[in-house]
Amino acid sequence: MIEVERKFVVEDDISMQGFETLEPSLRVGSVETVDLDAVYYDTVDYRLARSGTALRLRLGGTDAGWHLKLPGAEPDTRIELRRPAPAIDAASLLLEAPVVPDELVDLTLARTGGSSLQPVVRLTTRRTRTLLVGPESQPLAEVDEDEVGAFLNGVSEPHDHWKELEVELLEGTRSQLEKISRQLERSGGRPADYGSKFLRAVGSAAGRPFLAEPQPVRSDKDPVGRVFVKRWHDLVLELITRDVGVRLGDGEAVHKMRVAIRRLRSVLRTFTPLLDKESALWLRDELGWLGSVLGPVRDTDVLRTHLEELLSSLPPSDVLGPVRDDLGEYFTETRQKALAESLKALRSPRYLDLLDVLRAVTLAPPTTPKAGRSIKKAAPRLLRRELERVAGRIEVAAAAEGSEQHELALHEVRKAAKGMRYAAEAFEPVLGKPARRIARRFVAIHELLGSGQDAVVARDLLRQLGARAGARPGHNGYTYGLLAGLEERRFDQAAHKLPVLWRAASSPKLW
C-alpha cells in the first residue's frame, strides 16, 4: 500500500465538525472509537527509527497484524506492507512479544544490516476515527484523533503521553488533503515534527540519523566537495529505498536501484581527481559487482517486452511455429534464475558491508584537499574531463566502423555518454541551464546507443533461439531469423545517427 497522510499535534479535544463548509463534496460519514495496542521492533541502536522506518505488531481495529512502514518517494507518503497477525491477545503481547517473521526480517535488511530485531516500545492508542465521504458516500479521507501512551520495553508505566491527529487520504485528492489540513490547523492542530508515533516515542534515544545530512550547496563559490557529498547522499538514499521493491520482485524497483548504482559509480569517476584513489576504486568495483547481479533481471524484462511487441507487429503469415510460447517460457525461466541470484546477493554479508561503507561516505567522504576548490573553478575542468572521455571513445568507434569491434566500441561510447550526462546532472542544481543543456544532449546519445546495444543483445539471442528451434520438431527458425534481421537494422540506424548527435553535444557554442 502507498499511504498518504499528515500528522498534527493537539493539546485539547478538537471538533470534527465544519468539514462540510470546505467544499460541497465533503461530509462526515461515520465516527467510531477503537482501542489499539502495538509493539514496535527495532535493533538495539534504533536503525529502523533512524531510517524513518517502523515495524510493529498491532492488535485491535480492522488492520490487526504486522505492519512495515517505510518512507515513500513523494512528500507525505509512506509504503506500508501488511502481513497477518499471529494468534495472540493483548495480555500475551505484554508477556512475550512474538518473533518477527523471516520475510519482514529480510525486507528490513538494508536498514538493519543484519542486526536482530527486538521489541523496543509499546504504544496504546484510543482512536476516534472520523470518515469523510463524498456525494456518493465514497471514502475520501480519514481523520483520526488519537490519545497515545508510550511504554518502553519491559516498563509498566508510560514514559510519554500525547494527543495527535492523523489525516489519511483514501480516495480523495491532494487538493482535498490540503483543505482538510488547513481546517485542522484552524481548529488548533499544528504540523507534527515527527514522522510517526514510533519516532516520537523513541525520541532522542535513536541518536544520529541513518544517513548524515549533507551541507547545502547554495552557490558556485561553495567547495566542489559539497556537490559530491550531496549527490552521494541522495543516491545512497535512493538505493536503500528501492531495496524492498527488489526483494518483492518488482521490476521497476530493480531498474531504479540499478540506475542509482550506475550514478554512484559515475560520481566516483567524475570526482576522481578530488578523491582518495584507492577508496574510490574499491567502491567502484563493489558497486560494479552489485550492478552486475541486478542487471539480468531488468535486462530480461526489457528484452521480453520489446520482442513481444516486435513479434506482434509481424503479419500472422510470418509467425511460424509456437514462437510466442517459446519466448515466454525462455524469459520466465531466465528471470526466475536472475532474480534468485539478485536476492542471494542482497542477503550476503558483502552487500550489507557495502551498504555500511556507502553510508559512512556521507559522514566521512574520501576527499582530498582539492575538494575545497570552488565549484566555479572545479566544475568546468571536471566536466571537460568527461567530455574528453566521450570524444576519445567516439574516435575509437569511428576507426572500428565496418569491423567486428564496432559494436563493442559503440557500447563504450554509450557508457561514456551516460557518465557525461550524470556528471552534468550532478552540477545542474548550482550551474543551472548550461548543465541542463549539456545533460539533454548526452541523454539523446546514450538513449540512441542504448537502443543499438539492446538490438545487438536481442539479435544474438534470436539467433540462438532460432538455431534451437530449427532442430526441434514442430518448431521453425524462420521467424527468429526475421526478427534478428529487424534488430540488425535497428543497430545500423543507431550507428548512422550518432555523428549528428555528437556534433550537437560537442558544439563549442554549447560548451
Image: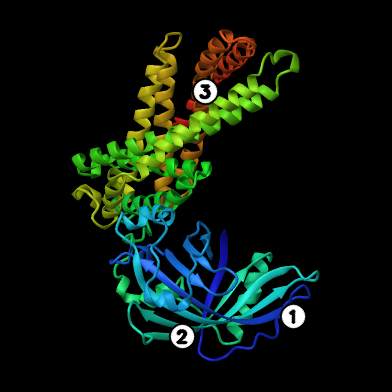
Give the side of residue 437 with respect to residue 184, left or right. left
From mark 2 to mark 3, how far is it between C-alphas? 60 Å
- Residue 31 position (above or below residue 138): below
Report x, y in % for residue 308: 63, 27
Location of residue 298 in the rendering, given as x and y in whole percent from the top left corner = 49, 35
Q: Which residue: 36% across, 87% down?
A: 157
Which mark lies nearer to you, 3 or 1? 1
Colour scheme shown: rainbow
Residue 120: where, in percent of width, then height?
Answer: 35, 72
- Residue at the extreme right: 136
In the image as oriented, which residue stretches furthest toward the bottom?
12
Residue type, label 1: Glu
Classify residue 53 by image quadrant: bottom left
Instruction: First in sequence, mark 2 or 1: give its number.
Output: 1
Front position in the image: 313 or 40: 40
- Residue 452 is labelled as 3
Q: Count numbered badges in the picture.
A: 3
Residue on which disc 2 sits: 162
Q: Earlier in the sequence, mark 2 or mark 3?
A: 2
Rendered image: mark on residue 20: 1
- Camera-side residue: 411 or 289? 289
Q: Is residue 355 visible?
A: yes
